[in-house]
Image (cartoon, grey):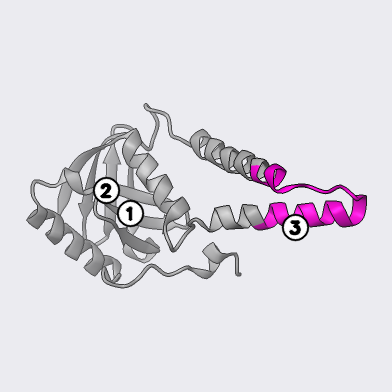
Amino acid sequence: MKVTTDITPDDHQAFTRHIWYSGARGSWLWFVMIFVGVVALSAMLEANAGIHLDTATMLVTMVILTGYLALAQRRIRPRADGASLGPRTFELTTEGLWERSRCYETLTRWPGVCAVDETARYFFVFIDNCQAHIIPKSAFADMEECARFGEELHGRAGTDPAAPLVILPEIAGVS
């Protein structure tokens, strides 16, 4: 089965948000971790240097750190004329998932697919913890074609579309 689409900056941003904020790979947990870090830093400063940070200072520090994470997220955006954006064709074959664009083509063999995350608007076919083929559902002529593609994709990749997202040990920082 084959589908042709145009990957836009919005599609890539949706993928980045999916990684940062989905239950399996990130979430609001970032904010909690920053808060705990700032509280721990405040306690260390008070215990070791006698410097007391009030609540307002801690909140400002959290906002600054959260802003830094957002800036870091923007810095990894792909170029408009680069390898990640633009017209491409995805094809499901017995070998694996082919992705073809203006400048390259790649084959991800089925054993190389780590996970398939399906959202309301996308199929994200993960080939690593933070790298995936981005397939917008808007590329399909209708919902039936999209559903057939999804069934074939999950079937060939050996993934269960109804299964909840699971944190892989590598993602969670456990080796």
Decide which of tag 1 and tag 3 comes sooner along the chain. Answer: 3
Single out the residue that lies furthest toward the top: 81
Classify mark 3: helix, strand or loop: helix
Rendered location of residue 30, percent (x, y):
56, 54
Question: Counting other residues with Cα less than 10 Å from the Cα at mark 3, is it few (<14), some (14-19), or many (20 or more)?
Answer: few
Residue 76 x %, y %: 50, 37
Tell me residue 71's x, y (percent): 55, 35
Q: Which residues are magenta?
A: 36-59
State yes or no: residue 87 in magenta.
no
Q: Is residue 173 left or right of residue 118?
A: right
Q: Nearer the viewer, residue 25 or 36?
A: 36
Q: What is the quadrant of the N terminus in the image?
A: bottom left
Do tag 2 and tag 1 residues touch (Cβ < 8 Å)? yes
Give how far across and how far down residue 14 sits, in percent. 36, 44
Q: Which mark is residue 40?
A: 3
Q: Amino acid at mark 2?
A: Ile
**Considering the image in quadrants, where does the C terminus appear?**
bottom right
Nearer to the camera, 86 or 53: 53
Q: Amino acid at mark 3?
A: Ala
Relative to 145, 39 lies left or right: right
Q: Nearer the viewer, residue 132 or 12?
A: 12
Q: Is the stretch drawn in magenta largely helix, strand or loop?
A: helix
Q: Which residue is mark 2?
A: 135
Q: What residue did someone put label 1 on?
A: 124
